[in-house]
Image: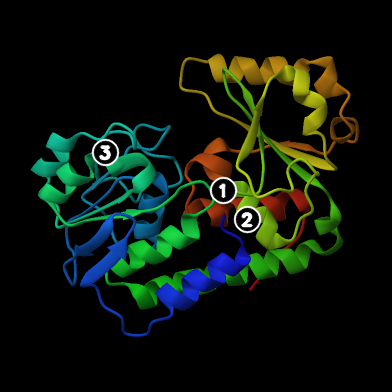
């Protein structure tokens, strides 16, 4: 699980090595020999795409955003020249090869089965996990790109934004914040080993007891709506484009059990963007999530 200590270790072991350069990079599948200054980078996860953009690198190809055509709205302008190569779990290997990359960045959870094929195309570096590990992965991607110092600067800026937002929130951090995601087939109650959970933990928010654990999520149905309560609820919806996710969310939000939650009764429920609070999963989305929290709580966070 990634907690603040793990984040600090990632910085200390990875991004703080002044003057480090690419070469042999250890990753989840072994060691890769990468070019000193890769020019044709393909990135195969959404959180990895956010990392390379934050590091000033425009990839030649990238995994499609989970929603968007083909990119999330918050990265679409920066990705105009980038070739989509399929979803994270359905990479078009022929297209990847045709783009002639000199470095491929991916993730073991998604790409272990095609690692040998990817490595035959170009040096391939795979991070270990997704969920709440985007900062650990960021350090690895920065190393592979030969941008250790730039990565350290990005993370220092991000840490400063977290600290400023936390300070501005003050006593609001005592609220138990509940994070809920509606999908067509289930409802998820997100815990601390999730993208939003890591950031809420870094800010210092309290969480309801069933969410205050180092796990990913509880997958439940409407009968578990009473378990979704908190002092404040943030919710978002995954819809694949067929409207089923949106319909499921509408149905749950109209349910008497939902209407009876204390946060609903108090008017402390907020609809937020699925891409920003969950799906994009990287540094750019994390910054936007911090902006959302500051706006919703009516605080000004400056660093």
Q: Relative to residue 114, is residue 174 depicted above or below?
A: below
- Give the Cα separation between the discs numbered 3 and 1: 24 Å
* Left or right: 257 as drawn, with respect to 273: right
In the rendering, at what x and y percent does residue 162 appear?
A: 64, 65
Is disc 3 placed on a helix, strand or loop? helix
Q: Residues within 10 Å of mark 1 (few under 14, many from 20)?
A: many
From the image, tell me which residue sits under label 1. Answer: 195
Q: Earlier in the sequence, mark 3 or mark 1?
A: 3
- Give the Cα separation between the discs numbered 2 and 3: 30 Å
Q: Which of labels 3 and 1 is toward the front?
A: 3
Q: Earlier in the sequence, mark 2 or mark 3?
A: 3
Q: Residues within 10 Å of mark 2 (few under 14, many from 20)?
A: many
Q: In what quadrant of the picture does the C terminus appear?
A: bottom right
Mark 2 and mark 1 in contact (Cβ < 8 Å)?
A: yes
* Residue at (73, 43) in percent of width and height: 211
* Residue at (85, 35) in percent of width and height: 263
Res. 199 mark: 2
Residue 145 is drawn in which quadrant? bottom left
Q: From this viewpoint, is residue 198 visible? A: yes
Viewer-closest of 130 and 95: 130
Mark count: 3
- Give the Cα separation between the discs numbered 1 and 2: 7 Å
In the rendering, at what x and y percent does residue 1 appear?
A: 57, 55
Is disc 1 placed on a helix, strand or loop? helix
Mark 3 and mark 2 in contact (Cβ < 8 Å)?
A: no
* Left or right: 40 as drawn, with respect to 207: left
* Left or right: 161 as drawn, with respect to 206: left
Q: From this viewpoint, is residue 55 visible? A: no
Res. 131 mark: none
Viewer-closest of 124 and 95: 124
Res. 113 mark: 3
Residue 216 is drawn in which quadrant? top right
């Amino acid at each position: 699980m990634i907690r603040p200590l793990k984040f600090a270790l990632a910085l200390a072991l990875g991004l703080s090595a002044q003057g480090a350069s690419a070469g042999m990079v250890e990753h989840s599948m072994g060691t890769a020999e990468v070019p000193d200054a890769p020019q044709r980078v393909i990135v195969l996860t959404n959180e990895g795409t956010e990392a390379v953009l934050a590091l000033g690198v425009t990839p030649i190809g990238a995994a499609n955003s989970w929603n968007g055509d083909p990119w999330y709205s918050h990265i679409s302008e920066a990705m105009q020249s980038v070739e989509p190569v399929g979803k994270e779990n359905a990479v078009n290997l022929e297209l990847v090869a045709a783009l002639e990359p000199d470095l491929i960045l991916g993730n073991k959870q998604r790409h272990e089965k095609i690692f040998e094929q990817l490595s035959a195309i170009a040096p391939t570096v795979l991070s270990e996990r997704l969920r709440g590990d985007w900062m650990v992965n960021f350090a690895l991607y920065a190393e592979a790109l030969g941008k250790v110092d730039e990565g350290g600067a990005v993370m220092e800026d991000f840490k400063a934004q977290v600290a400023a937002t936390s300070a501005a929130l003050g006593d609001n951090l005592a609220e138990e914040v509940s994070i809920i995601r509606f999908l067509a087939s289930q409802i998820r109650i997100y815990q601390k080993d999730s993208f939003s959970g890591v950031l809420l933990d870094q800010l210092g928010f309290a969480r309801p007891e069933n969410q205050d654990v180092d796990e990913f999520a509880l997958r439940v149905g409407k009968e578990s709506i009473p378990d979704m309560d908190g002092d404040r609820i943030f919710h978002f919806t995954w819809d694949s484009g067929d409207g089923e996710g949106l319909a499921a969310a509408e149905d749950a939000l109209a349910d008497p059990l939902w209407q009876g939650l204390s946060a609903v009764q108090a008017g402390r429920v907020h609809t937020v963007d699925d891409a920003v609070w969950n799906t994009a999963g990287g540094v750019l989305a994390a910054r936007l999530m911090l902006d959302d929290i500051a706006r919703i709580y009516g605080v000004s966070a400056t660093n």
